Amino acid sequence: IKSPTGCVGLLQFCSGAAKDYGLCHPTLGCSEYDYRTDPEKSINAGARYLDVLLNRYKKKGYADYEEFALASYNGGLGVVDKAIFNTAKQERGSWEKVKEQITPDLLSSFSTYGSWTLTQRKNKVKEITTYPGLVLGFKKQFLSQSSFSGKELSVIRSVQSCNECGDGFDN
């Protein structure tokens, strides 16, 4: 699976983040070694990346840190940070206010989206701004299931905090 932005695999990693999270070789890149389509490695990397994003926005004190992290995962850290910057200071912690700043014009200022048509950028804006609600809706549904015992969450946390996982490359 390859997206229009060049992201690949189950968790849609672009080459830069793939190198950062051990899915591609740190110096040779994805053309030589590409583990983005390996489900286990991709899910592990995606969990670690999402954990970094969640902690980043939580440490900044944003009440809607989950929404910011999910939007960043979907559309890019730079896009969300620029939207936050463009939002009035007293409203920067509100996803509802920040997402209003994610526009086709904002996307056109990033090389990833610069060559996209206006229609493509409008569609991506819709995707970025609705993605957090969709994911958090699934989270709410998952947590409300009577069969949920907490074991599933401990497995997720252990994947996120795996320090011995390594990146699979001999440096």
Image (spheres, rainbow, N blue to C red):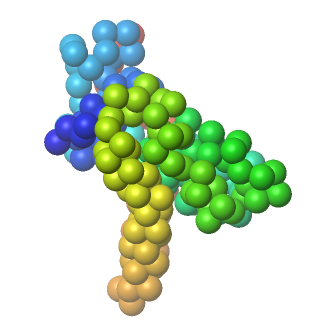
Against 113, is 100 above or below?
A: below
In the rendered image, is residue 22 in sight?
Answer: no
Q: How many marks?
A: 0
Q: Position of residue 39 (x, y in %)?
A: 22, 45
Between 32 and 159, the one nearer to me in the picture:
32
Q: Is residue 134 left or right of residue 105?
A: left
Q: Position of residue 80 (x, y in %)?
A: 57, 45
Between 149 and 35, the one nearer to me in the picture:
35
Quadrant (top left/top right/bottom left/bottom right) for the N terminus: top left
Quadrant (top left/top right/bottom left/bottom right) for the C terminus: top left
Q: Is residue 18 left or right of residue 97?
A: left
| Residue appearing at x 31%, y 9% in the figure | 28
In the rendered image, is residue 169 in sight?
Answer: yes
Tell me which corner region of the image, top left, top right, bottom left or bottom right, holds residue 8.
Answer: top left
| Residue appearing at x 68%, y 53% in the figure | 58
Between 49 and 97, the one nearer to me in the picture:
97
Q: Is residue 103 left or right of residue 96?
A: left
Tell me which corner region of the image, top left, top right, bottom left or bottom right, holds residue 131.
Answer: bottom left
| Residue appearing at x 48%, y 30% in the figure | 110
Q: Position of residue 40 (x, y in %)?
A: 26, 44
Q: Position of residue 143 (x, y in %)?
A: 45, 79
Q: Residue furthest left?
A: 1
| Residue appearing at x 46%, y 34% in the figure | 108
Q: Residue furthest bottom?
A: 146
